[in-house]
Amino acid sequence: MIYDCIVIGGGPSGLMASVGAASNGARVLLIDKGEKLGRKLAISGGGRCNVTNRLPVDEIIKHIPGNGRFLYSAFSVFNNEDIISFFESLGIKLKEEDHGRMFPVSNKATDVVQALLNKIKELGVLIRTNTPVKTINYKEELHEVILLNGEVLKTKSIVIAVGGKSVPHTGSTGDGYAWAKKAGHTITELYPTEVPITSNESFVKQKTLQGISLRNVALSVWNPKGKIIKAHQMDMIFTHFGVSGPAALRCSQYVVKALKKFGVPSIEMRIDSFPDENEEALLSTIQKRVDEEPKKAVKNVLKGMLPEKYLLFLIENAGIDGDISADQIPKQSLRNLTQQMKGFSFHVNGTLSIEKAFVTGGGVSIKEIAPQTMASKIQEGLFFCGEILDLHGYTGGYNITVAFVTGNIAGTNAAYHALG
């Protein structure tokens, strides 16, 4: 049998590509090396599946630091509002949460996966799981997908949707890069993004702050010349190896890039625990507390300003004995403490591995991809979508939006190509 389109990879972008191709009349075969389709989708958003984000397109592009501007053409064809309409048409009611994040009302990622599977079955997509691909032979007329068992499948168009190298237990183990290279594509350097950050600082090694969460702080990355590279105001947590949590995940790619760019063993990060207050205002808040309870131990006077363990750590860092009475503390020491609260500085030396990252940075160069169709500019009848491309966003529904948008467009145009 000759297929109009073979989609390789049953993650978010591959499922959406199958819908796009089959909705436009193509005979589609979807193949995946794993046992189940939609494995990454089923665990996304902490098992609730953050299907997209409702922010305006310009804002969404800003949250896709890895080549987001490339997606302007794609968003003009199929965008986040179209994703919402699509899922609601499948009977998945969605609700909006903080920062524009869209979730199914049921809070179950499995409902989203099931709705997609029902749709592709209804459209007559043929599905083969437990079917690893060995290689692809690109031909003038019909491309050949060679399976690991030696079987040869012929098709007019191919959509490669196998993801990057992150979260490998869901099947993304970087298989697609070799097939892209074989077609003549450039693979830009791969690196982990949205990944916890590591540090060799003594407070990390001694687990002094392990498990302490900080709410709504500004975490920033600084270059060796003392200039800020990037800051993110969100929550974070200290771990036994460094820092994690939303703010750290968002800063991680800037740490990776700075270490490489400056060729240094470590990079400075700072924590501003009161990002909405300037130093003088914070100092006067502290001074006011001291004036109100001068005879109390300073650690008790300042209680509640920050998580206790972190507060005691900063007091000690500022060279203050937390047990002495507040009125005994020199004004300069209080200023030192204020500076610690506004900019506790520590060094980080990298991140966890790409396999431990939520998202892969780098991939098939977007310079070689047509932005309105996701078609290869090098090989006729070849399309790419999702995380295999050199596109990556922050967590919060942005990567899945990229997957669904590029998937829909790749599948639709693969069908147009096959059906002439």
Image (cartoon, rainbow, N blue to C red):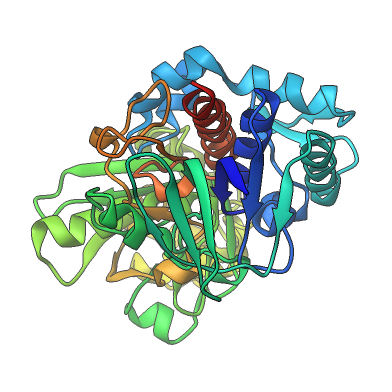
Q: How many marks?
A: 0
Above/below status of 107 relative to 91: below
Quarter of the rendering containing residue 13: top right
Left or right of 402, for residue 38:
right
Give the residue displayed 24% in from the left and 48% down from the top.
Answer: 185
185 and 389: which is toward the camera:
185
Residue at the extreme bottom of the image, as rendered: 206
- Residue 190 spot, x, y in % from top left: 30, 59
Tell which of 416 and 362 is nearer to you.
416
Q: In front here: 114 or 102?
A: 114
Identify the residue shown where x is 62% and y is 56%: 31
Whether residue 303 sits left or right of residue 277 in the image: it is right
The x, y position of residue 419, in whole percent, is 54, 24
- Residue 406: image location, x then y, percent: 50, 32
- Tell me the residue at 86%/45% (across/down): 111
Q: Residue at x 50, y 79 (%)?
A: 240
